[in-house]
Amino acid sequence: MKSNEKNVVITSAVRTPVGTLGGSLKNIQGHILGSVVIKEVLKRSKIKSNDVDEVIMGQVLTGSAGQNPARQAAIQAGLPIDKTAYVINQVCGSGLRSVAAGYQAIMSNDANIIVAGGQESMS
């Protein structure tokens, strides 16, 4: 590797249980599930919430979720309110596109630490 190149690494991967349609997770909104995952990602990777530059979450069903569910998840997970967050809605590819956007932000020196993934409640 050349001295001006950087490595981008995934320090932790967490997911919630997969439920069934109309099952036990049916009343839990996507941003709540997202906040649980964000907390666990930070815990496992030993990253302080202050060190996170941005949260990028894929979510398709946002109609009744209020404004910017990614930000809701980030704040509920304990990230400071001065940290930015945004949602990507690309149907089935939303979570993967969020990870790709995080990679691009790091490679372009817009950020050092990104939390990225998907949050959805389809029960």
Image (cartoon, rainbow, N blue to C red):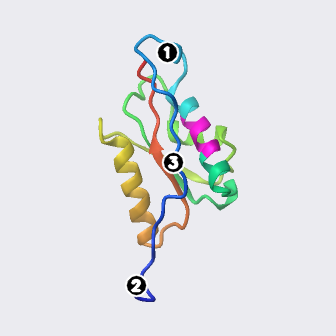
Instruction: Considering the whole magenta stretch, tell me its main secondary structure.
Output: helix
Q: Distance between the residues labelled 1 and 2?
A: 47 Å
Residue drawn at x 53%, y 42% is 14
Residue corresponding to mark 2 = 1
Three-letter amino acid code of the residue under disc 1: Lys
Where residue 32 sits, quadrant-wise, is top right
Q: Is mark 1 on a helix, strand or loop?
A: loop
Q: Determine the residue positioned at 61% across, 35% down.
A: 36
**Comparing labels 3 and 1, the label whose residue is closer to the camera:** 3
What kind of residue is marked 3? Ala
CA distance separating discs 2 and 3: 25 Å
Q: What element carries label 3?
A: loop
Q: Around disc 1, counting alpha carbons within 10 Å, would you say few (fewer than 14), some (14 to 19), or many (20 or more)? A: few
Q: Do the residues labelled 1 and 2 touch (CB within 8 Å)?
A: no
Mark 1 or mark 2: name the one nearer the start of the chain. 2
Residue on which the image places disc 3: 13
Q: Is residue 35 magenta?
A: yes
- Identify the magenta region: 34-40
Label 2 sits on a secondary structure element that is: loop
Residue type at mark 2 is Met
Disc with the residue nearer the chain's start (2 vs 3): 2
Residue 89 numbered tag = none
The residue lying at 40 percent from left, 84 percent from top is 1
Is residue 72 part of the magenta span, yes or no? no
Q: Are marks 2 and 3 in contact (CB under 8 Å)?
A: no
Indicate left or right for 77 with 120 as reference.
right
Point 68% across, 56% down: residue:
46
> In this orientation, which residue lies closer to the viewer: 21 or 110?
21
Residue 85 at x, y = what percent?
52, 49
Which quadrant of the view contains residue 33?
top right
Q: Residue 26 has which mark? A: 1
